[in-house]
Amino acid sequence: MTGKKADRLRDAHADDTVAPSPGRSRAARRKRVLLAVAAGSALVAVGGLGAATLVKSPAERAARTAPPANSLITAPVTSQVVNQSVPTRGVVYPPTQYNIVPAAASADVTQLYVSKLGVKTGDSVASGKLLAEVSGQPLFALRGPVPAYRDIKPGSNGPDVTELQDALAELGHSSRPDEKGSYGPGTAQAVSDFYRKLGYPVPVTGATTQQAVDTAQKAVDASQKAVDSLTAQKKAGAAPPAAPPGPAQTGAPQTGAPQPGTPQPSAPQTGIPQTGAPAPTAGLDLDRQIADAKKQLTADKAALAKAAAANGPMVPAAHVVFLPTLPAAVTAVNGSVGSPVNGTLLSLTSGGLSLTGQLAPGQAAGVKAGMAVEILVEDTNTTLTGTVAEVGAPTTTPPAGKVITLGGAAAGGGAGAGGTAGGNPGSAGGQPNAPGSGVSYTPITISPTAPLPATLNGKNVRLTVLKDKAGAPVTAVPVAAITTNAAGQTSVTKVDAAGTRTTVPVTTGVTADGMVAVTPAAGTELRPGDQVVVGK
């Protein structure tokens, strides 16, 4: 029984699973329909809300696109020094730039290479300073007004010898007892001492002059020997040397008394008396020979002295750079150790850098010598000071110094013949008055308070010429804050923290850099920090 009952219950459960009742199926369908209707209603509501946000009335659109309400632009009242000024540009350049072109001092040097550098850009060069070494040859600077134009050596005379002597004396190498402008033993000793201190072999005049000395010395020795021999014969009472045998003579000179009937050559025929018994004029002939020999000795000694004077220590023109003013500044080094030398190796400026301002038409009025100048180096934000030294006549020629080439064979061309290194002296950096633009300007020469550093060579700087001397701080407002009414009265509008506006009558003063000095009218107040209207 129990087994059968279990089977019936299992069959009944299977029937319920496979075929639900009709009442339950209808309830499920109604539930699904209600859910679909609710979802559709939600979508319609959201869509309507979105569309409503896009629909605006004309009034709403006008309100949204209308310009904002007027607002005030204010600026603070300040207390500052207001000086009338003129802004302009200026060019820094060397008044004289020396381009150094090395040359070979010896025929043995076939190619020039930089074997040593003694300076770098920005260095200061004093007298006696080694600038460089080119193919083993020193190149040094000395003070002197005349550039080296020849080798200075023993026997030389002239102003270049004088400047060499003065330059060496300045370094402690005296040329005494030589006279000024004359290269003698004293100058030779001074040159030798200088080269040894510099650490280089002393250059000499060479084999040719030494050979001349040797030849002259041999002539002196021979003349001295002749004088000594003749003098010894005279002291011994001997006759002068016999004349060489003539064509009628047998060979050896005769001695003793002359044989009767034997022809004898006369002294004038040979100039040398015969040996043997002295002729009546034998003593006179010996004296004449001694005198002639001494005269020849004197001439030979003079020739030796001349040869010796031209031989010895020298200063090749290729070794020395004479500059009129030292110290000088190195503005460019166009080479490195091991590189070949081609044209200008070094550029030096002597006597400092110059600064010329360029005033546009209309700016020069009122600018005078003695006015203070502020110099702004913009790339380093450095401010320097100076004064106006001179106001020139209007010109279109760009400000620039002169360039002098020293040494080498490039004086008429090449890299160092008129070009500049380390900055173009006349470059204006593309400013309105740039050189070459043909624009007229008024040049003003600026005298810096302190020497300008060599790094400024070729720079274009900003200048501010202060027409008035700096005074006490004054109350100042922006120029835009000043208003003038129909009656010509000037005033400013002050605004407090609450936005309240107050008109303050003022008297204006000096104007500079967009600011104007003001004095409020009696009974009114305008203090630093107050806000004034400068625009709307």
Image (spheres, rainbow, N blue to C red):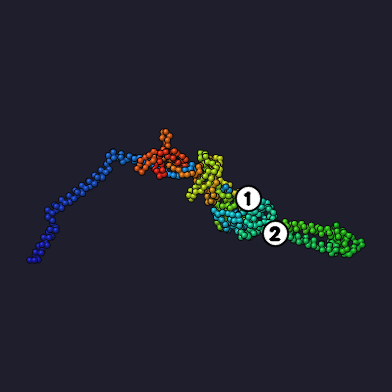
Q: Amino acid at mark 2?
A: Gln
Tag nearer the camera, 2 or 1 = 1
61 versus 220 height, above or below: above
38 versus 439 height, above or below: below
Residue pushed farthest front? 523
Q: Position of residue 148 (x, y in %)?
A: 63, 52
Q: Give the number of the disc on residue 298.
A: none
Q: Residue at x 34, y 40 (%)?
A: 69
* 3D distance between C-alphas at marks 2 and 1: 32 Å
Q: Residue at x 19, y 48 (%)?
A: 37
Is residue 119 something that shows in the picture?
yes
Q: Camera-side residue: 392 or 231?
A: 392
Q: Residue at x 55, y 52 (%)?
A: 331
Q: Amino acid at mark 1?
A: Pro
Quarter occupied by the N terminus: bottom left
Is residue 427 something that shows in the picture?
no
**How many callouts does the rendering have?**
2
Examine the image and state in which quarter residue 176 appears. Answer: bottom right
Q: Position of residue 404 (x, y in %)?
A: 59, 49
Quarter occupied by the C terminus: top left
Q: Camera-side residue: 436 or 251?
A: 436
- Identify the element where label 2 is drawn: helix
Q: Is residue 499 left or right of residue 346?
A: left
Examine the image and state in which quarter residue 516 appears. Answer: top left
Examine the image and state in which quarter residue 53 appears. Answer: top left
453 versus 478 height, above or below: below
Crowd around label 1: few <14 · some 14–19 · many ≥20 (10 Å): few
Q: Quickly name the residue at label 2.
A: 210
Q: Earlier in the sequence, mark 2 or mark 1?
A: 1
Q: Quickly name the residue at label 1.
A: 145
Q: Is residue 483 left or right of residue 451?
A: left
Q: Camera-side residue: 505 or 111?
A: 505
